[in-house]
């Protein structure tokens, strides 16, 4: 699995190896000490799955929602739904009552509305009365009937009690949610979940809302981590054992990757960067890719020993030859990850930085720690380097493939172009997804719960329209209130949107109650005075504050509605309808300024950012890798050829996503850049070896056959390891992450295969000496080639 | 404190701040209580014990008979946004019944709104009516909502509505005298005789006039919950010292309520406290 190709002296990092040879104990001690320091931070790792946090805080969508939260309070839905055969039984009601009471006690909960204690506005002989739906916990049949009548006659039918009477909802408002540290809102969600467990059965208790999704996602991240990491390590152990069958052979690469994970995750923890659904992929990826470096080095060492060298000579030869390729492959990988820094999505940026750091750590560890240990340990007495028969067959097949490509270079090239075109067509169907809900598996409790709750109580998200009249008390103007009612009717007519309400509902309900409950008075009074006085009466009569509906001086008001959880594409169409309506009815130069605000807007901004991120980071990674290769190989053409297989790889990835309906989301947008960073190595290996063969005087067809069986062998095994490693992500409990696992495994397959097909096909079509650049001459002088 | 409830005003949007604002305008007696008490205190005396000082304060409230004032009532939320209204307050107490009428002068859209409350001494709930000119008829207000905030302010009946009846409910211990701003004050530590909303009160009483200038209310967990500040003391023609500005801050919620006295009159016609006057334009 040696990777012989010429590299300029510049990155011939033999200084590192010399250090490892001269002071092995010092090197080992120093590296272990650093590792211990990073490891000390691991237990402090934080978890975060908050959507809002993915978008930088200065984005207008975030700013709007923060402003609305400051003005009107919590701008999200948090519902605890109890569902059974019949809510109206003494037992179930008692359960609802005490569950609501206990939720009220949770620190950070500002308000709790439950169907039993919620205040209702009623008409009374001399005016209005504001009384709870039930005077106490209804126990007797009569009390229960009385309660059923009053709650089902109220506006809370469909909001706190389902129309079929089988479910009741408890609505939770969090304190100051706009500025709440995520830790707190997820703690609240955890406490509510604890209570739900306590009261569950025979009735079901379901929880919906973004706070709960975040909490649940955090739990899933933890679960995934504690399951996926050991699984990857186990698979790695198996591969290492199969390859080396010695303790050192298994232990050193394993130690390398584990250390790189500790460094990367420890640094994150040190900098207080939480593990998110995106950054959780870092450890798994590092485990999969970081092992290659150690394996290459050990391979070469074993080879050198088998060739009859003394331990010292074997080590020197190994490090002399391996430093450069290890550095080059890891640096291109680092470039691939680092290109994600251009992302507009915070966790993707973090993923890029820390995974790149982890790869660097693995590189340093491979170049320092492994030789230092090898210096101290006696050379292994036995080498199990027999070519297993399957390997032999693979090599034969690879050689045959090379021969076939050389013979049908034109055909292979045309076929590749056709594949790219077909895939590009498919990629046009690519959709974007930023709704966290859709990151979970279809059967997960969170999706099931949300479906049930939305069925009975409308959406699980909130969208709001903020009305700004520009003058204090402007909201009390009947014309404004009537326009708010019109807007509510419009909102309720939009599919997926329901239960629009505002201060206008309170006013018309008051007006009706003040007019003996006659339905013809379920309207806004005609004068501003009447509105103001009814609201004053409401306040004096003990009506709860209307702070969640109007600003303190009544210059702004909010119309809010529930919106169902839907895909980002549907959400975009829905929000666009709302925006169009607002633009048509409330022109920006009019008296009344209206703005659409809410988590759905944040989701759309995020979806757009996924798309933009994708374009930028992909372009950056391709160009950077092309440049690195051009410089290192001293040939611009080599740089161009090396990225051709990656274009096919990326096209296939997007094509498959487009045809199978897998959306671009926080996780899948990273695939292309990562694939470029890792996949470029295969082109590098292939082109370098081909040049050596040509230089050695072989004709192109012959050179291709040889290259395919030598470099091809390394490529094959490396790709196989990565495919198996990444495929483990398919066991994640996040649909998004498991799709990511499949897709990135697919890209490893395509990039390795295309480097064995497109690259030789193009090389065959070119003049044999076309690639002989500056480096070639350098390497000739440097005598680096084998 | 006690359980809070809300009217659900939005389905998607849980009504946030539970501020049950039940109240009676009777609370406004605070204003009058304060001014009248102050006006009655004409000389300073050496009062050795805390309870004596407290009793002295109570003595002042007993002097409340009748009076009227024009006040600004300002409420302020956590962010410092303010809402103001201008009210005319009429009060009478003949020892049999406490009567109070509040009339809105400002803002314009509630001008002419009147609130009448009559509570019999030793009787049950006070009777309360609200007259809304735009609706042309008075409405009865349920009287059982006497615990809570006055009209969305931070004043509650318990704290102020009952006048300075602290000696009925609290035992006072005199602490070391302190200066509050430029005023030499007695400092009292008040402990409730029965369990209630507060575990203790701390009161600064200006020695010269026996006016409490600052009262701190500590909740059952020992946290400072509210603070009352009395400022803008002015002497009237008779040389009596009258507070003109009363600020109650809710230290937990971050809100504030301010009463500014704009004008004090003494004549009150008993006709004010009738439904007939209530309906009159």
Image (cartoon, coloured by chain):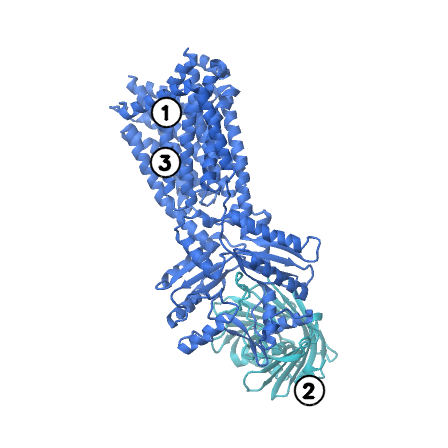
Chain colours: A blue, B cyan
User: Does the CB distance between marks 2 and 3 fall below 8 Å?
Assistant: no
Q: Residues within 10 Å of mark 3 (few under 14, many from 20)?
A: many
Name the chain under label 2: B
Q: CA distance from mark 2 to mark 3?
A: 91 Å
Q: Is residue B49 visible?
A: no
Q: In what element is the residue under mark 1?
A: helix
Q: Nearer the viewer, residue A103 or B267?
A: A103
Task: Give above or below for A589 relative to A784.
Answer: below
Q: CA distance from mark 2 to mark 1?
A: 105 Å
Q: Residue at x 55, y 51 (%)?
A: A574
Task: Give above or below for A260 relative to A439.
Answer: above
Q: Residue at x 40, y 77 (%)?
A: A141
User: Does the CB distance between marks 2 and 1 fall below 8 Å?
Assistant: no
Q: Which residue is mark 1?
A: A714
Count of numbered circles on the image: 3
Q: Residues within 10 Å of mark 1 (few under 14, many from 20)?
A: many
The quadrant where residue B53 appears = bottom right
Q: Which residue is mark 3?
A: A725
Q: Nearer the viewer, residue B98 or A504?
A: A504
Looking at this view, name the residue that lies furthest to the right.
Answer: B237
Q: Give how far across and how far down residue A679 sits, in percent.
A: 44, 29
Q: CA distance from mark 3 to mark 1?
A: 17 Å
Q: Give how far across and how far down residue A114 sits, in percent.
A: 47, 67
Name the chain under label 3: A
Q: Which residue is mark 2?
A: B270
| Quadrant (top left, top right, bottom left, bottom right) of the C terminus of chain A | top left
């Amino acid at each position: 699995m040696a990777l012989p190709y010429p590299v300029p002296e510049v990155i011939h990092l033999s200084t590192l190896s010399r250090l490892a040879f001269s002071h092995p104990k010092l090197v080992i001690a120093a590296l272990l000490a650093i590792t211990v320091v990073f490891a000390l931070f691991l237990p402090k790792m934080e978890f975060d799955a908050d959507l809002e946090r993915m978008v930088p805080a200065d984005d207008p969508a975030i700013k709007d929602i923060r402003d609305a939260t400051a003005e009107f309070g919590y701008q999200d839905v948090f519902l605890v739904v109890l569902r059974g055969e019949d809510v109206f039984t003494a037992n179930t009601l008692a359960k609802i009552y005490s569950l609501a009471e206990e939720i009220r006690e949770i620190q950070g909960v500002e308000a709790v509305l439950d169907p039993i204690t919620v205040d209702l506005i009623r008409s009374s002989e001399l005016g209005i009365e504001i009384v709870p739906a039930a005077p106490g916990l209804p126990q007797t049949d009569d009390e229960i009937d009385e309660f059923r009548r009053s709650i089902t006659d109220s506006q809370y039918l469909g909001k706190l009690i389902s129309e079929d009477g089988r479910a009741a909802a408890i609505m939770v408002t969090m304190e100051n949610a706009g500025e709440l540290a995520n830790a707190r809102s997820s703690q609240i969600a955890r406490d509510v979940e604890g209570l739900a467990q306590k009261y569950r059965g025979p009735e079901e208790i379901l929880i919906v809302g973004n706070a709960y999704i975040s909490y649940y996602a955090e739990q899933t991240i933890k679960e995934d981590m504690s399951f996926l990491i050991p699984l990857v390590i186990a698979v790695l152990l198996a591969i290492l054992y199969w390859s080396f069958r010695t303790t050192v052979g298994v232990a050193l690469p394993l130690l390398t990757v584990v250390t790189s994970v500790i460094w990367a995750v420890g640094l994150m923890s040190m900098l207080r960067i939480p593990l998110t659904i995106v950054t959780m992929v870092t450890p798994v990826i590092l485990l999969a890719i970081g092992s290659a470096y150690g394996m290459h080095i050990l391979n070469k060492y074993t080879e050198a020993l088998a060739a009859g060298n003394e331990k010292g000579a074997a080590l020197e030869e190994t490090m002399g030859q391996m430093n450069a390729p290890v550095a080059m492959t890891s640096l291109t990988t680092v470039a691939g990850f680092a290109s994600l820094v251009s992302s507009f999505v915070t966790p993707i940026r973090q993923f890029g930085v820390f995974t790149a750091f982890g790869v660097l750590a693995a590189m340093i560890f491979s170049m320092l720690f492994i030789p230092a240990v090898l210096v101290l340990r006696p050379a292994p007495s036995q080498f199990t380097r027999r070519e297993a028969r399957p390997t032999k067959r693979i090599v034969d097949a690879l050689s045959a493939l090379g021969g076939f490509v050389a013979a049908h270079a034109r055909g292979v090239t045309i076929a590749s172009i056709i594949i790219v075109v077909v895939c590009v067509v498919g990629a046009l169907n690519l959709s974007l997804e930023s709704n966290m809900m859709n990151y979970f598996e279809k059967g997960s409790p969170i999706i099931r719960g949300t479906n049930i709750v939305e069925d009975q109580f409308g959406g699980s998200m909130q969208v709001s329209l903020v009305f700004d009249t520009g003058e204090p008390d402007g909201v009390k103007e009947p014309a404004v209130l009537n326009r708010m009612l019109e807007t509510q009717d419009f909102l309720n007519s939009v599919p997926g949107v329901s239960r629009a309400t505002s201060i206008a509902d309170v006013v018309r309900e008051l007006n009706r109650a003040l007019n003996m409950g006659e339905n013809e008075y379920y309207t806004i009074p005609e004068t501003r005075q009447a509105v103001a006085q009814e609201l004053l009466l409401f306040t004096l009569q003990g009506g709860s504050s209307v702070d969640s509906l109007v600003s303190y001086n009544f210059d702004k008001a909010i119309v809010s509605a529930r919106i169902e959880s839907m895909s980002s594409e549907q959400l975009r169409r829905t929000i666009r309808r709302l925006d169009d309506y607002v633009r048509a009815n409330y022109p920006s130069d009019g008296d009344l300024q209206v703005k659409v605000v809410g988590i759905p807007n944040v989701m759309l901004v995020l979806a757009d950012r996924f798309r933009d991120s994708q374009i930028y980071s992909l372009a950056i990674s391709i160009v950077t890798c092309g440049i690195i290769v051009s410089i290192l190989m001293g040939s611009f053409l080599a740089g161009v050829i090396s990225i051709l297989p990656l274009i096919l790889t990326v096209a296939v990835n997007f094509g498959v996503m487009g045809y199978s309906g897998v959306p671009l989301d926080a996780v899948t947008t990273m695939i292309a850049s990562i694939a470029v960073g890792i996949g470029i190595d295969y082109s590098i290996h292939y082109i370098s070896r081909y040049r050596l063969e040509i230089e050695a005087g072989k004709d192109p067809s012959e050179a291709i056959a040889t290259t395919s069986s030598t470099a091809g062998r390394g490529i094959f095994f490396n790709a196989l390891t990565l495919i198996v490693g990444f495929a483990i992500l398919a066991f994640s409990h996040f649909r998004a992450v498991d799709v990511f696992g499949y897709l990135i495994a697919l890209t490893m397959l395509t990039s390795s295969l295309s480097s064995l097909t497109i690259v030789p096909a193009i090389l065959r079509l070119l003049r044999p000496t076309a690639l002989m650049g500056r480096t070639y001459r350098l390497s000739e002088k440097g005598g680096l080639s084998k | 404190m006690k359980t809070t409830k809300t009217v659900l005003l939005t389905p998607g949007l849980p009504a946030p701040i539970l501020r049950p604002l039940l109240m009676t305008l009777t609370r406004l007696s605070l204003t009058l209580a304060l001014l009248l008490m102050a006006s009655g205190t004409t000389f300073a005396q050496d009062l050795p014990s805390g309870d004596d000082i407290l009793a002295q304060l109570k003595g002042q409230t007993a002097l409340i008979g009748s009076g009227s004032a024009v006040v600004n009532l300002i409420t302020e939320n956590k962010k410092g946004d303010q809402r103001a209204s201008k009210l005319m307050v009429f009060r009478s107490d003949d020892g049999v019944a406490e009567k109070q009428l509040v009339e809105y002068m400002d803002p314009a859209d509630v001008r002419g709104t009147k609130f009448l409350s009559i509570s019999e001494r030793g009787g049950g709930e006070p009777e309360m009516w609200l007259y809304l000119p735009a609706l042309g008829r008075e409405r009865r207000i349920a009287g059982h909502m006497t615990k809570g905030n006055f009209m969305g302010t931070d004043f509650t009946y318990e704290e102020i509505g009952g006048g300075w009846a602290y000696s009925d409910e609290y035992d006072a211990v005199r602490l070391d005298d302190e200066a509050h701003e430029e005023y030499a004050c007695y400092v009292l530590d008040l402990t409730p005789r029965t369990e209630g909303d507060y575990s203790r009160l701390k009161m600064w009483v200006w020695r010269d006039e026996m006016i409490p200038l600052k009262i701190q209310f500590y909740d059952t967990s020992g946290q400072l919950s509210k603070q009352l500040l009395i400022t803008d003391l002015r002497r009237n023609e008779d040389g009596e010292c009258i507070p003109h500005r009363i600020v109650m801050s809710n230290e937990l919620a971050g809100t504030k309520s301010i009463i500014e006295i704009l004008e004090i009159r003494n004549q009150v016609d008993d006709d004010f406290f009738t439904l007939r006057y209530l309906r009159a334009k």
